Amino acid sequence: MFVGGQCPGIDLLEDLTGMNFRVISMGSSRGLSAMADSIADIAGINIAGSEEYNLEAIISMGIRNAVLVKGYRREQGLIVHPESNIKNPEDLPGKKLANRNRGSGTRALLDKLLEELAVKKSTTKAELVKTIPGYNSGLRTHRAVCEAIASGKAEVGFGIRPFAETMGLKFIPITVEDFDFLINREIMDIPQIKSLLRTLRSSDFARQLPSGIITYDRTGEIIEDI
């Protein structure tokens, strides 16, 4: 079972390996919880830390019988209608937001940006979000965020580039994050996982990733000392 953040990179890994994951897109924190409870075999995670993406969150949850495999990098940014005049996070007050669910790495990343914006505006994040209608919404996937914007139910969202471009929406890049894989240590030597790791490191995978997702020099690196 694969639990965690939604990503087209996972779909591509399925296609190239011929594997059929049972994917539950519930966000990074729930992916970690599922690993801690021995419910999931793999978690896809994107949780920023002070020094290393994802590793601090894994350690804080006391997860031990697992291996962190560095995945790829994704652009995260604002998603708006093509004709929108929204240009950066400072334009969010007064605009209806389609927000991700609590526990998702994407929502945590947006919260970090809002905390920085609040400091610039000499206010608190708690006060700032009161000016952003829809902040307390909790959509479970990037696709759902894009659908809300495309249908006019929201004016802006925060998410990854591929879903925005697929639905004809405008993507405004803000930052780049790491999307990694936490794998149960006991299954690392089975053929399916070996195939997954070979594919993750392959040129075919790198070449076929959609715009806004790239492999890099640490892709496929295994961090066993958790």
Image: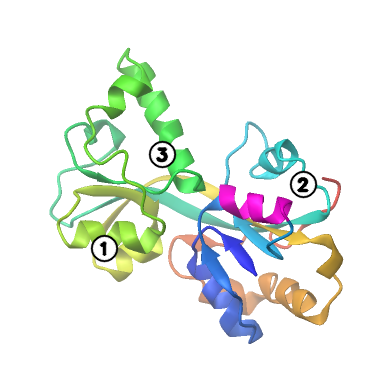
Classify mark 2: helix, strand or loop.
loop
Q: Residues within 10 Å of mark 1 (few under 14, many from 20)?
A: some
Q: Residue at x 71, y 40 (%)?
A: 61
Q: Is 33 in the magenta?
A: yes
Residues marked 2 and 3 touching at CB (< 8 Å): no
Q: Which mark is residue 147?
A: 1
Distance CA(mark 3)–CA(mark 1):
19 Å
Local secondary structure at mark 3: helix
Q: Residue at x 29, y 24 (%)?
A: 128
Q: Which residues are magenta?
A: 29-37
Task: In the rendered view, tell whether residue 136 sits above or below residue 70.
Answer: above
The Cα atoms of the two marked residues, 2 and 1, are separated by 35 Å
Question: Residue 145: x and y, percent?
Answer: 31, 56
Q: Can you identify the residue that label 3 sits on?
A: 110
Q: Label 2, on which residue?
A: 63
Quarter residue 16 falls in: bottom right
The residue sitting at the bottom extreme is 18
- Quarter the C terminus occupies: top right
Marking on residue 10: none
Q: Earlier in the sequence, mark 2 or mark 1?
A: 2
Judge by depth and name the residue closer to the eye, 19 or 50. 19
